[in-house]
Image (cartoon, rainbow, N blue to C red):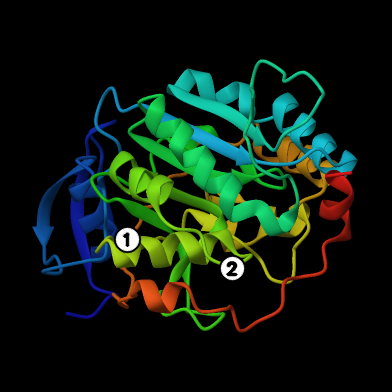
Amino acid sequence: MAESSWVKIRLHRDGSTRVVDSRAAYTLIQLKAATYLEGQLPAAAPVQTITFPPNTRRLIGITTCHGKKFLEQAEVQRQTWVPLCAAHGIDVRFFLGKSERPAREDEVYLDVGDGYAGLPAKVQAMFAWSVAQGYDYTLKTDDDVYIIPERLDRVPVAPHDFVGRFRVPSGGYPAEYASGFAYWLSKRAAEVVSKSQLNSDWAEDRWVANVLAIAGIYGMSDWTSYVAPCPPVLPDVISRCGVNVAAVFCQFNAAQLYRMHAIFKGRPLVSPPTTLVQAPRYTCTIEELMQPHKDTMPNRPEHARATQ
């Protein structure tokens, strides 16, 4: 049936009858927002409505470090979207390496280095902490990320173990991996990561995906909820284009994080139906995992200074 065909539905909220595109009608009916009246509906449409079961314990784990730039970005997150998470039952913690500075109430100091090359060890320790604290799902994210908690509360994740915005394999390692700015691990997957062997890779996101592949845990990709423009895009551009319905956006400095909040804090909730697509199931072995990476670590001098 052509996508442009039309059907009648009755919206549950106000009882009115509307004539809408068949695929939109299908989505509204799947979301239990409307009743089908007449016409023809497609046999299938890309829609995914599974979110989190009630009482699911969720943690947003923000990896950051003691460098001035990163502490400033983390502070803006505290002043903008982080306080909104509590209303949706989502906890937030900032994870840093060792330091002589006393930790703040929402900070967790891990017994690892604080530089960029040590990020896999930091993320591993973060997931070990989340498992020990009894979280069912943990979203790993960064200090340059803006999140809309009301939307994040509705993204499809459960019952899957590994969800994010997947990209093709790189560095000589076989598995596709979720971009490190935002991916969910279940308690089961987080426990695997917490106990897995580190290698020489500097990219924590692809190390995580490859150790999960060894354990037979594969990802589900969501290209609607998580946005990573490359090259980075200014907040005002994001607000005017189709990606503005996402829940997680990345690659902002402190001023841009403030601007994202000014733009999105008063917007009505938009939760488009999201399809989770199974990422290709590339296998990985311990031997492949322990091979040296075949690319170069980005030059991140600000991370090096953060450890001094």
Q: Tell me what residue is drawn at x 59 percent, y 78 percent.
A: 293
Q: Considering only vertical position in the picture, is 196 above or below 52? A: below
Name the residue tied to disc 1. Answer: 275
Q: Which of 183 and 5 is in front in this view?
A: 183
Q: Tell me what residue is drawn at x 47 percent, y 78 percent.
A: 173
Which quadrant of the view contains residue 12? top left
Quadrant assignment for the N terminus: bottom left
Q: Can residue 219 be seen in this view?
A: no
Q: How crowded is mark 1: few (under 14 residues within 10 Å), some or many (20 or more)?
A: many
- Return the x and y of residue 119 as percentages of the image width and height: 64, 53
* Residue 179: mark: none
Q: Which amino acid does label 1 sit on?
A: Thr
Left or right: 109 with respect to 134? right
- Return the x and y of residue 137 as percentages of the image width and height: 37, 37
Label located before the other in sequence (2 or 1): 2
Q: Which of 195 and 295 is in front in this view?
A: 195
Residue at disc 2, secondary structure:
loop
- Return the x and y of residue 301 as percentages of the image width and height: 88, 59
* Residue 201: mark: 2
Left or right: 209 with respect to 5? right
Left or right: 164 with respect to 247? left
Residue at the far top: name it.
105
Q: Nearer the viewer, mark 2 or mark 1?
A: 2
